[in-house]
Amino acid sequence: MTNLAADRQQRGNLPADVTTFVGRRKELAEAKRILENARLVTLTGVGGVGKTRLALRVAADVQRTFADGVWLAELSALRDAKLLPRTVAMALELSHSRSADDPVDVLADYLADRHLLLILDTCEHLVDACAMLTEVLLRAAPRLKILTTSREPLAIIGESTLLVPPLDIPNPERPVDPDCDSVALFTDRARATVPGFVMTPQNERAIVRLCQRLDGIPLAIELATVRLHAMSVDQIVDRLDNRFQLLGTTRTSLERHQTLRAAIEWSHDLCTPQERLLWARLSVFPGGFDLAAAEYVCADDELPADAVLDTLSRLVGKSILLREQGTAGWDEVGSRYRMLDTIREYGTERLGELGAGDELRRRHRDFYLRLADEAAGEAGRDHRQLAVFTQLRREQANLRVALDFSLDTPGEELRGLHMSGALHLYWAFLGLYSEGRNWLARALAAVPDAGANGRADRDDDRPDRGQALYAAARLAAWQGDFAVAETHIGEAGRIADELDDPLLRAKVVHVRGLITFLSGDDQGARPVLEESLAAHTALGWPDPIALSAVAFAAAAWCLAGQFDRAVAVCEDGLSTCEATGERWCRADILMVRALARWMSDDPEPALIDLREALRTKETYGDLPGIAMSLDVMAGCAVSLGEAERAAVLFGATEVLWESLGAPFAGPSYGAVRDLTMSSAEQTMGAERFATAHRRGAGLPVAAAIEYALGDGAAAPAITRSTGAGTPDPLTRREQEVAGLVAQGLSNREIAERLVIAKRTVDSHLEHILAKLGFTSRTQIAAWAASRSPD
């Protein structure tokens, strides 16, 4: 789930350490020194040497020195260089951008005045694209610094490189130093494998030999320690001796690659035939995956489905696979797994030798095509809507690879067309409009119109083409690309008539109303949108997402001054939402009802609607919906005589709209917003308004939401006090959470009490622990109890 509330705890997205960071004192100090004096630093070295781990530790150590945080963009699963700017934007939480502009320009504009560190991890397969992007961003953003990891430098002006060598290895001529990095790493990981493991006079020489033979490569050392379950260190070393001799003539002449390949092939040889087979088959997953995906894609008569879990678990035990932990814990989304890049590349080689690559990739595509279809079918259900789109977001790398396979493989294009149409709601919900349009354009080009020349041999593609055209038109309209939207929806309308498809026809009318409204013709949009509502009502709302037409129809009435009519349309739509279980559109309708109530001089009930709508939009991560909610809240503040509060909110939304690069919801809406801002400025005076506006512009999105929901303390320059003259370290919401912890409530119970997501509570608790320097809930409870007036 896109949880903007996490931004309240820290600025950035660095993952938590799963294992201890061992050694690298020299490299760590040098990397920080270089980063202090250079704007682009690249950590280079062979695969498995620990470039990513070092980069993350450097970033964690310097995080506090960057006002706008440290942000990680993981590129290992990215194969299409054209998607690099979009992937970086997603890492920066700009994934919701609905701009039709070049995503590089959107990134440059967003970063222009920010002071942050951007990490581009694993650049070697996209080195040219990464070089071009970093050069553009560094020129556009004078306070930006970039740290990259790559097997080769980006080779651009201003780049400073640091070679990350293998870990120091012990000198056999001297007594064993337990602080030697490779020895320390081995003993640390050995203790994780065999609790109580220690280096003794009996095993220390074997440990020295092992570290030497593995050349200090961290990945090789970690692979070796997993064998301690069944072998002594001496036995491992004995097998390493034989294995290195056997693999002395490997494909590469680079010694370190020989050592790494030897370690991987040695680990491969120690696997059972069933483990080797699953290892090769799992290499088709470009990123993380779950058990269901592994069973569907990898199981057959040779590897039965009921054997996959046990085999997969053994691969985890041997460090071939890593088990991923969700933000809120292991059980939040079920177990997920991933391979290190080097391990996956080795598996791909083995899969090629088996000659089953295309079949495995087809099964991979089939699994994610089914997931896309299920998500499209569940999109309107209250208990599933958020969950299915959360799942799709986790699977983004797999979805991209599945689409690529379909659209690049002869005979599979129609499935790619179908899949792109099924995914359009996912792209719409998360604001991935540009990416969605790119996939849809590829799919439509890959499957030309079968009916254009009166052909009947491919009529089976007409429903999928109609859906894809509708989706492409809707995304284009949201980006203000009305000419393209008109072209797409015109063809979709012809297909609807040819197929006599009433649902597609209703969708076509919906998009035509959307285009009319967003292009500024409020009056002309009303009858078209109401025609769409009537058509969907007659069909029983098989597509609940079409309820978004309710919000636009009501907005058109509202902007015409027909407030009672607007409220009536909203209330009819809310009744339908209750019947269908739809939540996303329901929040839009609440927002428009609030707009009508505010414009009819009834701001207090409007605020009730807005708070509910804003909480939903925050949960979904719908940035345009958040911006509009905050705008209307600012209007209510003006009506209630709180001009300063309005100025802060307008400052926050000003930055948000700019970062989205999307137009306001029609020119009339923009005019109302401008008029309200002018009213606040006249009330306060230009200088005071500008000060408050700047304060709002400095708020992260999550802090702006807190401020709007009543936690005004979230705004900068507003001082909180403990009552004893000491600034309170916690925000109002954090104090509330701490108080409920003191009452003995669980995280889920706190979430239910505060009507917020459990994940938000988890994030609050992490921030409370960090701010107060505590390590347990018990400490939080004691702290909260000591401050209670009772």
Image (cartoon, rainbow, N blue to C red):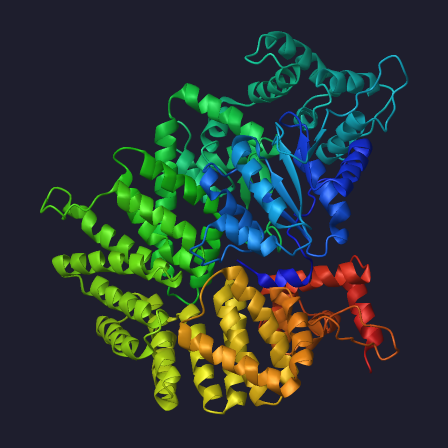
Q: How many marks?
A: 0
Of the pair 400 and 270, the residue shown nearer to us: 400
Q: Can residue 627 be seen?
A: yes
Residue, far front: 686
Q: Position of residue 561 (x, y in %)?
A: 38, 88
Q: Is residue 444 above or below residue 169?
A: below
Residue 725 vs residue 561: left or right?
A: right
Q: Position of residue 213 (x, y in %)?
A: 72, 15
Residue, far right: 175
Identify the residue shown where x is 87% and y is 73%.
726
Q: Position of residue 785 (x, y in %)?
A: 81, 74
Of the pair 354 and 489, the residue shown nearer to us: 489
Residue 761 vs residue 300: left or right?
A: right
Q: Position of residue 140 (x, y in %)?
A: 60, 49
Residue 215 vs residue 748: left or right?
A: right
Q: Is residue 614 above or below residue 483?
A: below
Identify the residue shown where x is 69% and y is 80%.
688
Q: Quadrant of the C terminus?
A: bottom right
Q: Can residue 300 be seen?
A: no
Q: Is residue 541 above or below residue 597?
A: above
Residue 694 placement: quadrant: bottom right
Q: Is residue 759 above or below residue 212?
A: below
Residue 490 vs residue 545: left or right?
A: left
Residue 554 placement: quadrant: bottom left
